[in-house]
Amino acid sequence: MADNNKIVVALDLFDPIKTRAIAQKIGEDVFAFKVGWPLILGSNSDIINDLARYAKVICDVNLANIPDINRAITENIREHGAWGIVAHPFAGKDALDAVVKSAGSMKVFSIVAMSHPGSATFIDRDTEELCALSASSGAYGVMAPGNRIDVLGKVKRLAGQMKVLATGIGTQGGDPLLALRGGADYLVIGRSVYNARDPLRELKRIDAVISRLGEEQRPEASV
């Protein structure tokens, strides 16, 4: 699949059997899976190892606790074979530092804005500071809303060398092509894929959209 390294499929399901079946079918056509509390509560941490057989796994556990708890959870997730982990920087630099330091080779993604309207109430007003804190702690990337292009663009300008993981694509209204144009490095797509009658076919449809950006950016052939 062209440009498949841009697609992260969120598997926010409680059913581990269905999740494994989807992962096996689409694993070769995604950059990574993003899993969170629904799937972990519906199974256990071993599901991370299972899914890592098919693609990289980013654990979106929204860490926002004291440093000691953040450290313990990060180490457990790392030991279960995750490629990445998601944390909230608003808990403070010491809390985010604990995640980064205990992540080892795992990539840490820091949430600096979210895809739901409530993010505007508190998180969005501190996005600039949260980006700076994330960078100073050594986060690999930041998470920002792909369905709110103005915010996404702001985060891209603030992100520096950090990767931008755009959420809210598909069911929440985010357009993959607009999000990529707006600065996203990766696209998180959940319900529109895993609820599709044929998840692989839906991924290929999305990839066809993404491929248009590559065609637009391709330099014109010399005459």
Image: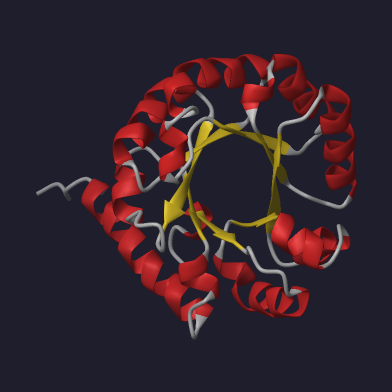
In the picture provided, is 183 more to the left or to the right than 60? left
Q: Is residue 166 visible?
A: yes
Q: Which percent across, then down, holds residue 8?
A: 55, 56
Viewer-nearest residue: 200 or 115: 115
In the picture provided, is 193 more to the left or to the right than 40? left
The image quadrant that residue 96 belongs to is top right
Q: Residue at x 36, y 55 (%)?
A: 176
Q: Which percent across, then down, holds residue 38?
A: 71, 61
Viewer-nearest residue: 130 or 65: 65
Q: Which percent across, then down, holds residue 62?
A: 68, 41
Q: Residue at x 52, y 76 (%)?
A: 195
In the picture provided, is 154 more to the left or to the right than 196? left
Reply above or below: 1 against 34: below
Q: How many marks?
A: 0
Q: Which percent across, then down, holds residue 127?
A: 47, 23
Q: Residue at x 71, y 42 (%)?
A: 85
The image quadrant that residue 78 belongs to is top right
Q: Residue at x 63, y 64 (%)?
A: 11
